[in-house]
Image: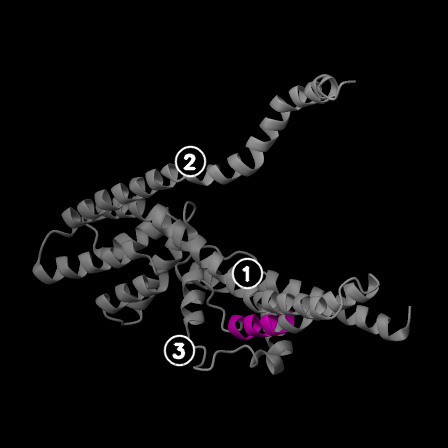
């Protein structure tokens, strides 16, 4: 192995390890959660060095992170909305994200070229160029897919647990608590079942304690979660306070509606199972079944019928 190949392998190893470590640290943002627990008086857990590593990765990749940054800026881009929906509030996460994106875009083609070179040049010419382009596209769009997956998972968690939170909030309001106090109590009770929803409700309480208007704090809740059901809940609370209707009755009706919608989505997902099973059934299970059923018959035909038809 020549010196150039050794240097290329070393660069590939460093790139892959740095990208993997960066993605792992980016996907575990515990700093905001620890800050919320400290403010509401809960016992603070031992601080993990996640935020420290995210800042280190952001500082290391800052010179190249601008290559993948959106032209309109991070604050005005759709990526910022995905970060909010995913619950990533670390200020060092966006530079680390774009830095990892740039490193993967440049590093994966380098890894592919090194693998092809070590394999003896299996792919050459247009095939090698196509392989490098596919790897570059995977490195560029891969972090976006991971971020979208995190956002969708968190939104699904909030959607599935929001009717239960509304039931608890209805009980608290009927017991005499105000809307803010009911949300704080619901956040404490929902901490184990849905940490994401509990954190969002705590953030609403923090905004109210900081002097923000209630309507604005609730609108920020709907904006951060990106769930239509939460947006409907915010609209319902604002209308109930504006027209003087019963908040408890409105919450009860809203919880019944959301529970019905959750059941309908579950029934819709169950109805799609037959269609989703159609492809593996036709292309995977059915051919195997035909081989098992028709195989012995075809062997018998080949051994007895074909020779007799040939006159042997």
Mark 3 and mark 2 in contact (Cβ < 8 Å)? no
Read off the residue under disc 3.
Answer: 76
Colour option used: one colour
Q: Give the alpha-carbon distance from disc 1 to disc 3, as whole Å.
A: 22 Å
Q: Closer to the camera, 84 or 187?
A: 84
Specify the segment rendered in magenta: 93-104
Q: Is residue 171 visible?
A: no
Mark in front: 2 vs 3:
2
Q: Is residue 267 visible?
A: yes
Mark in front: 2 vs 1:
2
User: Secondary structure under badge 1?
Assistant: loop
Q: Where residue 120 sits in the image (x, y, percent)?
A: 84, 63
Question: Which quadrant would residue 128 be assigned to in this image?
Answer: bottom right
Question: With respect to residue 54, does 174 lie above or below?
Answer: above
Q: Give the alpha-carbon distance from disc 2 to disc 3, as whole Å.
A: 42 Å
Question: With respect to residue 30, does 255 lie above or below?
Answer: above
Quick one: quadrant of the C terminus?
top right
Q: Closer to the camera, 293 or 53?
A: 293
Question: Which quadrant would residue 289 be assigned to in this image?
Answer: top right
Mark 3 nearby-residue class (10 Å; few <14, some 14–19, many ≥20):
few
The residue positioned 33% from the left and 57% from the top of the image is 227
Q: Is residue 244 left or right of residue 271?
A: left
Read off the residue under disc 1.
Answer: 27
Magenta residue check for 45? no
Q: Where residue 24 sits in the image (x, y, percent)?
A: 61, 60
Read off the residue under disc 2.
Answer: 274
């Amino acid at each position: 192995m020549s010196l150039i190949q050794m240097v290329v392998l070393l660069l590939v190893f460093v790139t892959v390890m740095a990208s993997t470590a960066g993605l792992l640290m980016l996907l575990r943002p515990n700093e905001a959660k620890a800050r919320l627990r400290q403010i509401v008086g809960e016992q603070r857990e031992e601080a993990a060095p996640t935020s420290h590593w995210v800042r280190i990765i952001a500082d290391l990749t800052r010179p190249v992170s601008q290559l993948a940054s959106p032209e309109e800026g991070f604050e005005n881009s759709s990526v910022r909305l995905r970060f909010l929906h995913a619950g990533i509030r670390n200020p060092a996460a966006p530079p680390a994200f774009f830095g990892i994106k740039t490193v993967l875009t440049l590093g994966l083609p380098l890894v592919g070229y090194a693998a092809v070179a070590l394999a003896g040049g299996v792919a050459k010419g247009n095939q090698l160029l196509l392989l490098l382009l596919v790897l570059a596209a995977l490195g560029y769009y891969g972090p976006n897919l991971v971020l979208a997956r995190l956002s969708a998972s968190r939104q699904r968690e909030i959607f599935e647990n929001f009717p239960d939170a509304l039931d608890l909030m209805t009980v608290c309001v009927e017991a005499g608590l105000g809307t803010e106090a009911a949300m704080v109590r619901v956040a404490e009770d929902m901490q184990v079942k849905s940490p994401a929803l509990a954190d969002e409700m705590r953030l609403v309480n923090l905004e109210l304690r900081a002097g923000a208007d209630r309507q604005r704090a609730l609108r920020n809740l709907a904006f951060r979660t990106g769930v239509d059901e939460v947006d409907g809940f915010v609209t319902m609370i604002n209308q109930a306070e504006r027209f003087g209707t019963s908040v408890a009755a409105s919450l009860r009706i809203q919880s019944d509606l959301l529970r019905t919608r959750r059941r309908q989505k579950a029934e819709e997902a169950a109805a799609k199972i037959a269609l989703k099973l159609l492809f593996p059934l036709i292309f995977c299970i059915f051919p195997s079944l035909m081989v098992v059923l028709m195989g012995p018959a075809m062997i018998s035909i080949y051994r007895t019928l074909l020779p007799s038809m040939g006159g042997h």
